[in-house]
Image: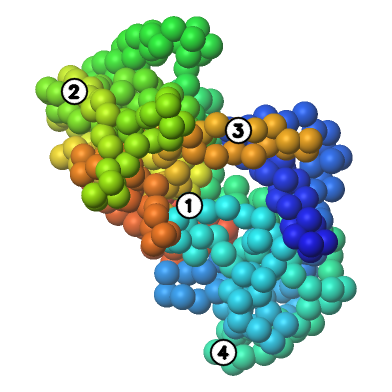
Amino acid sequence: ADKENDKIANYIAWQKFCAEFHDGHVGFAASDTELKEVADRIYGNDYGLSLVTLDNGKNVAVNVDERLSEYGIKTGTVITKWDTADPLEVARKSESFKTASFADSENEAFYLALYAAGVGGDTVTVSYIDENGNEKEATLKKLGNYSERVQKTIEILDGGVETGHLMWADIDEKTACLRIKMMNFDSESDNTGDFSKMKNGIIEKLNEYRAKGVENIVLDMRNNSGGSSDVVKVLAEIFAPEGEHYYATDGKWSNEKGVYLTDAKTGKFVEGKKNFYKGENLWGDVNVIIIVNAGSVSAADHLTRIMCDFENVTVIGFTGPNGSAQGIGGIKLESGWLIFSNALLLDENGDVFIDSGVDYKSRNKIDIKVPLDENAIESLFTDGGDYLMKKALEICK
């Protein structure tokens, strides 16, 4: 019981930290000192590196402290053992992973190795492959707390174009990018449901770009924290082919029973209202690239699902979006919140819209899963580049 209570306390503290750090759905009043204490406690010790798993299955060092150069460990060095164990096994047993939350198994696998690099005592023994292909061992000393290094690593992996929400950036002469950090516009629009100001502003800017000869539009939705389905419709209407398009179906709610109804024979949810939107085909003649990551959640999942099938749209990412697309509610606890799905959406087949079932696989999809390979690692962690944007430009050509 004591262990379970500790785990619950860690989980609540972790959600509190994530909400502040990742700008998530839930807001907390917490001091910087409190957040740092939570992060330091959960992430463990810093030994001068983070770990990621490449597409070929190898675990490699990234964001490496220069002090590790004396061992020959640098960005891209293959790490074979972490204190004599497989790094991914270590990661799964770590306190930080136990408090993590992923809606999709592929997204979990992408980030899993990160959690291993904070596990250990004052020292940790690391096995690695040197430049000559030989396996060696090094005993690394604790340098501090791992929280700052892993946060920086995540920022590098997940970072989008550095501009404000719904702001534009010129990528090159033929390419413009709209940064979409959330599916919201302003409080007035949220209250009234009228997002015409937002829509007209985007269309006006698109027309300016068309006049300048821009042929490629990138929608950067990395770490999009979700929001309103009305914003999803606005964006989809601008880029969708002309005519009516299916969005999703509401589950049918019973006020009497206090549940969403299911069919007694099939066990499937009973379908309620079907939702549609009207495409305007304003930009059907250009390339539209959508960049997502595992932090593209909720309404960002919706837009990915809707636009992925447009002929001129290509959705790319190291992973698919988050895979958590249902409406949410919450109960305030003494410390933090308990968050849960409370608004059922179904797809055209009557199945749950996007969210995974017991298979732990999101029903969302992307067109191109960009490999996290040696080229990506060098671009991200050595050159400081935006590898996914580079891939987006290659697609446009």
Q: CA distance from mark 3 to mark 4?
A: 54 Å
Residue 279's tag is 2
**Earlier along the polypeptide chain: callout 2 or callout 1?**
1
Percent position of residue 277, x then y: 23, 22
Residue 368 in view: yes
Q: Quadrant of residue 252?
A: top left
Label 1: few (<14), some (14–19) or many (≥20) C-alpha neighbours in 10 Å: many
Q: CA distance from mark 1 to mark 3?
A: 18 Å
Nearest to the eye among marks 4 and 2: give it.
Answer: 2
**Earlier along the polypeptide chain: callout 2 or callout 3?**
2
Say if 371 sits above or below 261 in the image: below
Label 4: few (<14), some (14–19) or many (≥20) C-alpha neighbours in 10 Å: few
Q: Which residue is mark 4?
A: 132
Residue 174 in view: no
Query: Which residue is nearer to you in this view: 300 or 330?
Result: 330
Percent position of residue 167, x then y: 46, 23
Residue at disc 3, secondary structure? strand
Nearest to the eye among marks 3 and 4: give it.
Answer: 3
Residue at disc 1, secondary structure? loop
Nearest to the eye among marks 2 and 1: give it.
Answer: 1
**Proximity of marks 2 and 1: CB atoms separated by less than 8 Å:** no
**Proximity of marks 1 and 3: CB atoms separated by less than 8 Å:** no
Q: CA distance from mark 4 to mark 2?
A: 57 Å
Residue at disc 4, secondary structure? loop
Q: CA distance from mark 2 to mark 3?
A: 34 Å
Q: CA distance from mark 2 to mark 1?
A: 30 Å
Q: Amino acid at mark 2?
A: Gly
Nearest to the eye among marks 4 and 1: give it.
Answer: 1
Q: Amino acid at mark 1?
A: Ala
Nearest to the eye among marks 1 and 3: give it.
Answer: 3
